[in-house]
Image (cartoon, rainbow, N blue to C red):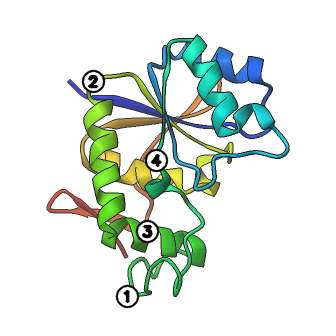
Amino acid sequence: MVERVYTLGHSNRSLKEFINIIQHYSIQILFDVRRFPSSRFSPHFSYNNLLKTLEKLNIDYVWIKELGGFRKFGKDVEDIGIGRSIKSEGFRAYATYLATNNGSKRALAKLASIAEQKTTVIMCRERFPWRCHRRFISDYLFSREFQVIHIIDVGREIKHKLPRYACLHDGEVVYL
């Protein structure tokens, strides 16, 4: 059986709209992969508020700081040539970080293990997955034979596939 994982960007959605989406997909656990789980513009998506909301809905909430985006070369990770075909330096740094950081590797393994047992959504801020680091987490899950579905809105979804600048080699994602 192929396991399914969803991704979702909270964007500027209302809390009601967000709850409608996660209930529509019968989400049991939400992994927050924002590096900083707060929002000045949408305070209902800040850590404590979101935790309380999801508790009331009987949905588990896990913030995984180690999978947060906004990684930089020279600060979070060294540029060792991974993903030269990735145009964005920030995304290239994130791909390098995921590939080389032991904490992120453990976090990915934990996420995958739990996702095998519970209906899972990975949440960040950006609505569109091609503009978000969730796509690199999705590549990892895809390499582990998960079906990854990016939720744009209820009924509007994108099935994840590896980008042109990535391939699988011995079960691992390699960025060209």
Q: Which residue is mark 3?
A: 95
Residue 80 x/y as whole percent: 37, 88
> In this rendering, is residue 147 above or below 99?
above
The number of callouts visible is 4
Q: Compute the Cα span from label 2 to label 3.
A: 26 Å
Mark 1: secondary structure: loop
In this view, the residue in front, 33 or 160, is 33
Q: Compute the Cα span from label 4 to label 3.
A: 16 Å
Q: Is residue 41 left or right of residue 97?
A: right
Q: Compute the Cα span from label 2 to label 4.
A: 18 Å
Q: Which residue is mark 4?
A: 64
Report the amino acid beneath label 2. Answer: Gln
Q: Which residue is mark 1?
A: 80
Q: Nearer the viewer, mark 2 or mark 3?
A: 2
Report the amino acid beneath label 1. Answer: Ile
Categorize mark 4 by other alpha carbons within 10 Å: few (<14), some (14-19), many (20+): many
Q: Compute the Cα span from label 4 to label 1.
A: 25 Å
Categorize mark 1 by other alpha carbons within 10 Å: few (<14), some (14-19), many (20+): few
Residue 56 x/y as whole percent: 59, 12
Categorize mark 3 by other alpha carbons within 10 Å: few (<14), some (14-19), many (20+): many
